[in-house]
Amino acid sequence: MTRYTPGKIVAVLLLCVLSALYAAPSALSPETRKSIEDSIPSWIPKWIVPHRAIVLGLDLQGGSHILLEVDAPDLMRAQVATLRDDVRRILREVRVTPQGGIGTLPRGVQLRVPEQADRDRLIPRLQEITQPVGGLAALGVTGASAAALTQGEGGLIQIQLTEAGMNDRVRRAVEQAIEVLRRRVDSTGTTEPSIQRQGANRIEVQVPGLQHPERLKELLGRTAKLEFRMVAEPGAVDVDSLPSRDNPGQTLPVERRVIVDGSALVDAQPSFDQQSGRPVVNFRFNVAGGQRFGQVTSESVGRALAIVLDNEVISAPTIQSPITGGSGIITGQFTVQQVNELAVLLRAGALPAKLTVIEERTVGPGLGADSIRAGTLATYVAGAFVVVFMLVSYGVFGLIANIALAVHLVLIFALMSLTGATLTLPGIAGIVLTIGTAVDSNVLIYERIREEAKAGRSILMAIDAGFQRAFATVFDSNSTMLIAAVILFFMGAGPVRGFAVVFIFGIVTTLITAITMTRMMINLWYRLFKPTRIPF
Amino acid sequence: MKLLRIVPDDTKFRFVRYRRFSYPFSAIVSIVTLVLFLTVGLNFGIDFKGGTLIELQAKAGRADIGAVRQVAATFGEGEPEVQEFGDAGGLSLRIPIQPGGEIAQAEVVRKARAALESTYEFRRVETVGPRVSGELVQSGTLGTLVAVIAVLAYLWFRFEPQLAIGAIIGTLHDIVLTVFFFLVTQIEFNMTSIAAILTIIGYSLNETVVVFDRTRELLRRYKTMPMQELLDLSINSTLSRTAMTATTTFLSLLALVIFGGPAIEGFALVMLAGIAICTYSAMYISSPVLIYLGIHGEFGRKDGVAEAVKASAETR
């Protein structure tokens, strides 16, 4: 008979105690957990002291999961527009007028300069923007060259954005967007939002326990690009026709040149207009923005200024007097809630590109609570079924298997608390299923012991042979389950991954509880009662 | 105290004989599965089809399914599916992918909230765009394939080729029958269903491996026992374990079906069917495969089919 050294027995008992300790915080109130966490001295790594509860998935605690994607074509259009502006600026500086203006390509611009002398002056300057530094560096492109310049017949010059430059830009846009989104979500006062990059061009936002998911979605999806431009006078060139917010269906001609944009804002607060009493947004520029705004408004008294938000004119007041104080108000037909949101958006800054919601999953807190209740009940009932069934089938050995099963469940909970794995509704299903399958290893071993005893072996020999021979089968059958579970973990997302985690933990811990622990308990039982035959 | 035994000791059922019935039966079911798959099709959820799913709970009394159906038709393009769901007063709404893209899809949810929020609690709102659903189909299919291949590789290393082939035929059979169950019951097929199928793959192998471990052991012990007899002995001697495990797993899943709530009911039902399918196939599908494949050299036996045919020809 295999003897266990005291060291081994102590190790297994210690494992039980530790797992019970790590699983315990889930049963405590959040306040108690917090106070335990706060009382941990700083020189001890936090995870050593059990204080963490199992993290519940959004499907159990209620909340929103929103997957956003950076609109790459939109970003490309913006890049091309900037490229155009740069080229136009350089043309002005070197005083070259291209034949037929600047043409737009899908991912760049082209122009025709027939004179060799003009080209000699122009090309070196244009090459600046294709360099990793200079020109486009202001757009945040580093490393790979952002654009490539090619020359063709008859003085044709083409500048096109490179693949590498574009990818780099998307990557940076995602990073910037995450920052902006974090500020926006934080401003709503939600607790513990999680905002993460996913893949090359996606952002996953998870917000637990939200009352108004639609408001959140509005907040996340808005680009919030604020621009101050002049309303164009008749006959002006470089004019955009933008829709007007106050008069739906109508458009307003607005100069393409941007005087100041939202990035020059240092603050924005909701307020009320002192004269009309209508809700407005008060804003303040930084120094450079304030100076520029003051200068342009002094030159243009009497003309109309267009306040453009996301390519829509929200209002177009006439400049009565120069605005040099570095602050101003945005008027328009707003409700109180709208100015609140606008102020939040302006404070958080504009997104570097349009974001599209490509997936949304929202679970109300009521459903989450119901799911926890139903899952817990199912777990208890399944546990009761299996415990009773094992008892009536195997007697003392059934009792031993049940103790092993209880430890097995505690181990799963402890592992989940320790690793911070998320418990989801499919995860609860996994726990229930594990209750059914965990005893399989015990059953395999017990049936084998029984066979060996029937074949005429003594009780000790039968137990030994049973464990030995069943081991290969137990190992095989758990390995095949493990393969399926690991693949599910890597492939699945969200709730389904929660199922895989529980299953993987369940399989790993079975090997400890069903083999080592069960065997120790059987040894103990043998030494205490000196039985002469197998009790089942 | 008298303890319970589901299976009496020393059973001598002649399982593999029934392959005459089990093989044609499973073949017919497989063909029916293929026909149903092509004609009726799986009831794909929004995970794979895209669209919007909304679960509602009436704030007071019963849900007025007719009224909701009528107002749901105005939310967007395409026919909305409205069904009773879960307890009294619960409804589920499925609205297909909108032609206007993500913005039109968001508009659907906004309209639904505006129209129904006063009388219904919005318990769940899920929207999956066409690109995400396409990717989920891809990763779901890929995951299932990778699982089958990984398991095949494991069996190849761990078992003799014939046993591995038997196990893999059993596993494929179980996947087909599980799909059959999905087709007949029209239970929604979503990401959780893929989890169910992968778990069933694991369980199926588990069952087969337990029998085959015994087969391998007996092959070493009884060099001359005819293959059919030896397979029957393998199944009979593991029968009480099979019955015990099937019962405990079945009881757990039954608890999940009854008490686990509507969100998990589909998964539990499929798993329940899966347990029955796996238990059946380990006895009647995977094991008899060995009769056809035969077991050569490794165990010092010569009773492959080819040899058997040759031997009978020689005696004649």
Image (cartoon, grey):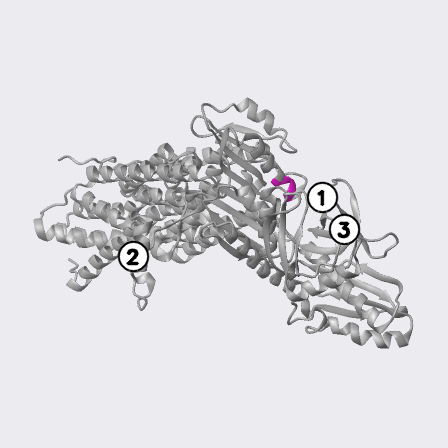
Alpha-carbon neighbours of circle 1 within 10 Å: few (<14), some, or many (≥20)?
some
Q: Are circles 1 and 3 on residues that touch, CB within 8 Å?
A: no
Kind of residue sitting beneath label 3:
Thr
- With respect to residue A320, does A172 lie above or below? below
Question: SS class of the residue under badge 2?
Answer: helix
The one of A470 and B221 positioned closer to us in this rendering: A470
Q: Nearer the viewer, mark 1 or mark 3?
A: 3
Q: Which residue is mark 2?
A: A36
Q: Are marks 2 and 3 on the same chain?
A: yes
Image quarter in which the C terminus of chain A is found: top left
Start-end of magenta stretch:
B102-106
Q: CA distance from mark 2 to mark 1?
A: 54 Å
Q: Residue at x 35, y 53 (%)?
A: A416
B296 or B145, nearer to the observer: B145
Task: Give the residue type that dot 2 points to.
Answer: Ile
Q: Which is more N-terminal, label 3 or label 1? A: 1
- Judging by the rendered image, the residue that carries numbered circle 3 is A318
Query: Label 1 is placed on what type of residue?
Result: Arg
Element under disc 3: loop
Q: Is residue A236 above or below residue A117?
A: above
